[in-house]
């Protein structure tokens, strides 16, 4: 067992931290306030190789290990969780191809992401099917060398800017999850409509839209895996991405902790800095302790993936614990700031809004507990 | 052209630096380290020059195994290979310049670029000593005419320029009353000031590539340099803590204090 980062991991951490501190932080409040797409920040992220971290080097990506990716993810989210979500959206969309694509598909559908800043979207959630994937309504009907996709997807990250969509649809609703199949839709084909982006509570820098598919034609060669394998592809993808989402929580919590430590050392009540009051000390101790615990759980869940082991249980531990933890830590940070914490000029209320989303997306905290219980009684 | 740049390992200025109670050094536990920012500017300038004129940037650092981290940082920025002079224990500026002289004589670069000083002990001596030992010209405190937000900076144009015949460098340097422009025959030693450039970020692919770039290991013995310090640090101490200010009730009291206590008016 080794409890320290390697020299390479420290270098990755420093590079990501520098980007988060010098590029993201100065503009985080602006993109939160205006809910506009942070294309300039993402352009820099692309140039630094922070986008497409999961794409293997032979297809033009950086090919970081899962553990390395979580180390970077903490820094990105410390900078701004919304920007981090937009950055990681490409990897989420490309994971099905990385995990289940053929060599030809990997060359063709991953390689071009190295050429210039391009976005991809992972399209699983539907108005009537979130974590309940088997209830999927979007259909894919085979016609010769093509599939014809019909249906609607919602809460699609970067969907308004994407040039490639990884879409899940069922070839036979009666088969429930055994009918689900994964496709890659390139560009903006006829019949694909993008709605305006949602006015979200937090993580407002990330673009979130609904998509409508009306007779969208996809060549058979863009089907990832076989018909009916889509559910397994989606679950494997989420096993891979859960450690990253968990680490977003850690980044938010660390930001909340640091702000709270700084503020509580300056702000005085009853003649002394509030950090000298035990009530504040205990809050800050809890913040630090829980942030670190979440980080360790997350490292473990990513490490398991790097060892080629199944991590469904541990990644649900990590994602659930970290998301709930970040919500509590960010809420406490607002408490430490008192009235100022509730005001947008101070940085902590954003953290509270950003944290909330992590309890919701990529499997709510409740669904994570379902998964945990299911795994325990297997 | 071939450029030798330095990468000293220094305490990260964002770390809290504490002097050991016995004054023999600083508390190293929990400290973070980074490349000396002036050296990082030197690495950047070297990379810009070879981007324009072709060639190679070789980065050198002196210290224990841990300085490989700073060498890797420079390699991740784009330097081609590294030289590590393995030595633990105190070194004074003469010894460092002596080691760099031998490395320079071995590598035979056209230009050596160093930070004007390192931010740990702020001596500002090594570049000057090195030029003297080598018998080369020197241009210290290299700066630039444009601002760090200029188009040229964004396009990563080098501020140190070669003359048309490629036999000399032109360097703008910061002096007390403005800027002076020097022309210096190659080979030469240049030391960098803060406003020379904005170093690029190390990219993730750069970091991954740096792993496979070679680091050559040398020692003072191999280089034939006696590094016995001529200077001994007797004691380090923290600057005295600042006393809290006071509030005065009115202007008259302020004037009184300025006149009778501070004796400035």
Image (spheres, coloured by chain):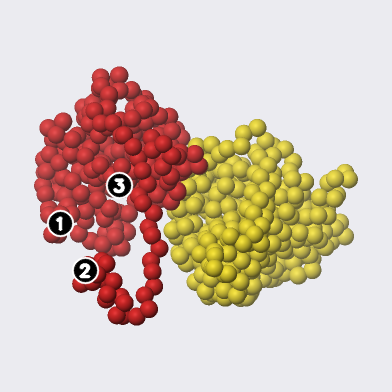
Estimate how packed mark 2 is, as few (under 14), some (14 to 19) or many (20 or more) residues with alpha carbons within 10 Å: few
CB within 8 Å, label 1 to label 3: no
Q: Which chain is yellow?
A: A
Residue found at x 50% / y 42% = B30
Chain containing mark 1: B
Quadrant occupied by the C terminus of chain B: bottom left
Determine which residue is flagged by label 3: B38
Viewer-side residue, B243 vs B215 = B243
Mark 2 — residue?
B264
The x, y position of residue B234, in whole percent, is: 31, 34
Q: Secondary structure at mark 3?
A: helix
Chain B color in figure? red
Q: Judge from the rendering whether residue B40 lies leftward or rightward of residue A100; answer left or right.
A: left
Label 1 to label 2, Cα distance in Å?
A: 27 Å
- The answer to which image quadrant residue A81 occupies is bottom right
Measure the alpha-carbon separation of dots 1 and 3: 19 Å
Q: What is the chain identity of the residue bearing mark 3? A: B
Q: Residue at x 28, y 71 (%)?
A: B257
Could you tell me which residue is drawn at 76 percent across and 63 percent down? A130
Residue that numbered label 1 is attached to = B176
User: Of tags 3 and 2, which is closer to the observer?
Assistant: 2
């Amino acid at each position: 067992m080794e409890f320290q980062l390697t020299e390479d991991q420290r270098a990755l951490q420093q590079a990501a931290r520098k980007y988060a501190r010098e590029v993201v932080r100065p503009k985080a409040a602006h993109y939160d306030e205006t809910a506009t797409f942070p294309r300039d920040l993402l352009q820099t992220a692309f140039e630094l190789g922070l986008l497409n971290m999961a794409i293997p080097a032979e297809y033009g990506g950086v090919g970081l290990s899962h553990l390395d990716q979580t180390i970077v993810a903490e820094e990105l989210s410390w900078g701004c969780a919304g920007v981090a979500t937009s950055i990681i959206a490409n990897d989420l969309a490309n994971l099905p191809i990385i995990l289940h694509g053929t060599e030809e598909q990997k060359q063709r559908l991953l390689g071009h992401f190295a050429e210039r800043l391009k976005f991809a979207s992972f399209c699983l959630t539907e108005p009537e099917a979130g974590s309940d994937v088997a209830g999927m309504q979007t259909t894919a009907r085979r016609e010769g060398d093509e599939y014809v996709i019909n249906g609607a997807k919602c809460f699609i990250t970067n969907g308004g800017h994407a040039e490639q969509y990884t879409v899940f649809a069922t070839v036979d609703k009666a088969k429930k999850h055994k009918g689900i199949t994964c496709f890659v839709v390139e560009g903006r084909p006829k019949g694909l409509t993008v709605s305006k982006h949602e006015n979200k509570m937090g993580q407002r820098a990330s673009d979130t839209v609904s998509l409508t598919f009306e007779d969208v034609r996809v060549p058979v060669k863009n089907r990832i895996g076989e018909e009916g394998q889509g559910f397994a592809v989606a679950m494997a993808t989420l096993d891979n991405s859960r450690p990253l989402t968990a680490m977003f929580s850690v980044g938010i919590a660390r930001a909340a902790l640091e702000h709270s430590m700084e503020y509580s050392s300056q702000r005085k009540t009853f003649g002394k800095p509030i950090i000298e009051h035990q009530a504040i000390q205990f809050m800050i101790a809890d913040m630090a302790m829980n942030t670190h615990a979440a980080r360790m759980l997350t490292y473990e869940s990513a490490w398991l993936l790097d060892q080629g082991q199944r991590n469904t249980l541990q990644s649900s531990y990590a994602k659930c614990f970290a998301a709930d933890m970040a919500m509590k830590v960010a809420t406490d940070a607002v408490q430490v700031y008192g009235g100022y914490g509730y005001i947008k000029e101070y940085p902590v209320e954003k953290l509270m809004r950003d944290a909330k989303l992590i309890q919701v997306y990529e499997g709510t905290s409740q669904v994570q507990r379902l998964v945990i219980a299911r795994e325990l009684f297997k | 052209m071939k450029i030798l740049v330095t990468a000293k390992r220094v305490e990260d200025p964002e770390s809290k630096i504490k002097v050991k109670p016995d004054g023999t050094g600083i508390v190293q536990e929990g400290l973070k380290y980074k490349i000396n920012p002036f050296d990082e500017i030197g690495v950047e300038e070297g990379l810009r020059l070879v981007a324009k004129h072709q060639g190679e940037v070789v980065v050198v650092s002196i210290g224990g195994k841990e300085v490989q981290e700073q060498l890797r940082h420079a390699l991740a920025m784009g330097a081609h290979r590294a030289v590590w002079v393995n030595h633990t224990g105190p070194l004074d500026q003469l010894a460092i310049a002596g080691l760099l002289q031998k490395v320079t004589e071995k590598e035979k670069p056209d230009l050596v670029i160093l930070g004007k000083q390192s931010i740990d002990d702020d001596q500002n001596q090594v570049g000057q000593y090195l030029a003297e030992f080598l018998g080369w010209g020197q241009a210290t405190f290299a700066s630039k005419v444009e601002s760090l937000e200029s188009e040229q900076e964004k396009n990563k144009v080098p501020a140190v320029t070669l003359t048309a015949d490629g036999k000399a460098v032109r360097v703008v340097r910061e002096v007390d009353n403005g800027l002076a422009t020097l022309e210096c025959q190659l080979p030469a030693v240049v030391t960098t000031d803060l406003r020379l450039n904005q170093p690029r970020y190390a990219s993730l692919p750069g970091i991954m590539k740096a792993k496979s770039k070679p680091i050559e290991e040398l020692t003072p013995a191999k280089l034939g340099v006696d590094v016995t310090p001529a200077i001994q640090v007797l004691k380090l101490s923290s600057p005295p803590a600042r006393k809290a200010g006071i509030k005065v009730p009115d202007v008259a009291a302020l004037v009184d204090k300025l006149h009778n206590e501070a004796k400035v008016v």
